[in-house]
């Protein structure tokens, strides 16, 4: 089924079903024999979706929240070295694509080094350390615990604290960016925006056109901030080892292009964030809960 709640199930039923589905998909990605980088990407994405679900339902999970969030965070991190290496290649390719065919050719020496490092990370972390097999085992173990999750209420009350916290924390991080935010400030904001985009996907059936569009907008914000973060990491990597990437004559002009693009992404993120975090958390939650109540009442109305 889709990554969302359905009107026929209680919130605990939906949380368990969605968790099981995402665990199965992540494990299948790691054990299905597909191209390694794609498998790692899909498995990490599944872990992120599960962690967003856990955050949304944290108000009803009690002590299980900390345990399960740590489990899927660790599984995600075990796969990060390979994914992070490939992301640097993707970030450079995006930047090169904006320069056109004439400017992109100058990136080739840097790209070759990044690809070589990506292949080395893949060999070290996937083949030698049996990472995918170990992470798949972690997922299977976590799957066995899902049915033991005890959620304390069948309705929206379970979701209210988690949704409120994710929206509030994202709004707070946006409001405190200030005039000279660091790459870490934008990265922290990105994490909250991505979690909220996933949580809104879970709630999309409540009002598909409106909540679904809002999920898409927060997803776009997360993508803008993700590109900004990747470029910040790429610049640090280049400047930390200039000689390996062709020396100052190649790295420094590229670093300038990176900073120009980061400035554009930061400006676009701020503009979008100003629209998306316009509501105070209390107003946002009031509207979401009212839509949920009306959605849950619709099947009963149709039956009557």
Image: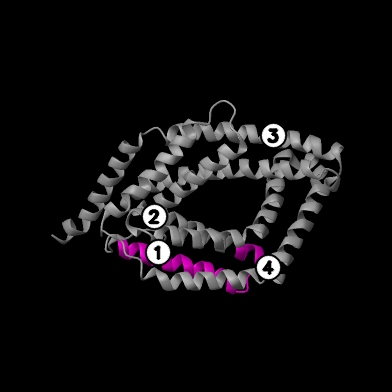
**Who's the residue at 16% across and 56% down the image?**
301
Local packing at callout 4 (Cα closer than 10 Å; few below 14, some 14-19, many 20+) is many
Q: Does residue 96 show up?
A: no
Q: Assign a secondary structure to mark 4.
A: helix
Looking at the rendered structure, the secondary structure element under dot 3 is: helix
Is residue 221 shown above or below 65? above
User: Which residue reaches farthest top?
Assistant: 179
Label 1 and label 2: CA atoms lie apart by: 9 Å
Residue 195 vs residue 210, the one in the foreground: 195
| Towards the viewer: 54 or 23 | 54
Residue 206, which numbered label?
none
Which residue position holds label 3? 259
| The quadrant where residue 18 appears | bottom left
Q: Which residues are magenta?
A: 12-40
Alpha carbon separation for disc pair 3 and 4: 33 Å
* Sequence-first disc among 4 and 2: 4
SS under mark 1:
helix
**Pointer 3 or 4: first along the chain:** 4
Q: Sort mark 1 into few (<14), some (14-19) or many (20+) by Cα contacts within 10 Å.
A: many
Tell me the tag on residue 18: 1
Alpha carbon separation for disc pair 2 and 3: 35 Å
Quick one: label 3 or label 1, which is nearer the N terminus?
1
Q: Earlier in the sequence, mark 1 or mark 4?
A: 1
């Amino acid at each position: 089924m889709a990554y969302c709640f359905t009107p026929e199930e209680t919130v605990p039923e939906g949380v368990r079903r969605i968790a099981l589905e995402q665990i199965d998909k992540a494990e299948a990605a790691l054990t299905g024999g597909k191209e390694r980088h794609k498998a790692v990407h899909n498995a990490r994405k599944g872990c992120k979706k599960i962690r967003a679900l856990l955050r949304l339902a944290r108000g009803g999970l009690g002590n299980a929240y900390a345990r399960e969030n740590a489990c899927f965070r660790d599984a995600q991190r075990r796969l990060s070295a390979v994914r992070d290496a490939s992301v640097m290649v993707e970030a450079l390719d995006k930047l090169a694509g904006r320069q056109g065919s004439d400017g992109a050719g100058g990136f080739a020496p840097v790209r070759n080094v990044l690809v070589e490092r990506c292949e080395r990370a893949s060999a070290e972390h996937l083949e030698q350390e049996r990472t995918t097999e170990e992470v798949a085992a972690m997922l299977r173990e976590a799957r066995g615990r899902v049915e033991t999750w005890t959620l304390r209420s069948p309705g929206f009350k379970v979701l209210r604290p988690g949704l409120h916290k994710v929206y509030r924390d994202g709004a707070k991080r946006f409001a405190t960016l200030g005039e000279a935010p660091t790459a870490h400030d934008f990265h922290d904001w990105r994490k909250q925006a991505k979690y909220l985009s996933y949580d809104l996907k879970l709630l999309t059936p409540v009002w598909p056109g409106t909540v679904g569009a809002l999920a898409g907008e927060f997803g776009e914000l997360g993508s803008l901030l993700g590109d900004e973060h990747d470029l910040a990491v790429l610049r640090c990597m280049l400047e930390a080892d200039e000689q390996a990437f062709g020396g100052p004559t190649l790295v420094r002009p590229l670093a300038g292009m990176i900073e120009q693009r980061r400035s554009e992404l930061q400006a676009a993120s701020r503009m979008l964030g100003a629209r998306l975090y316009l509501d105070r958390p209390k107003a946002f939650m009031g509207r979401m809960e009212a839509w949920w109540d009306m959605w849950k009442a619709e099947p009963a109305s149709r039956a009557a």
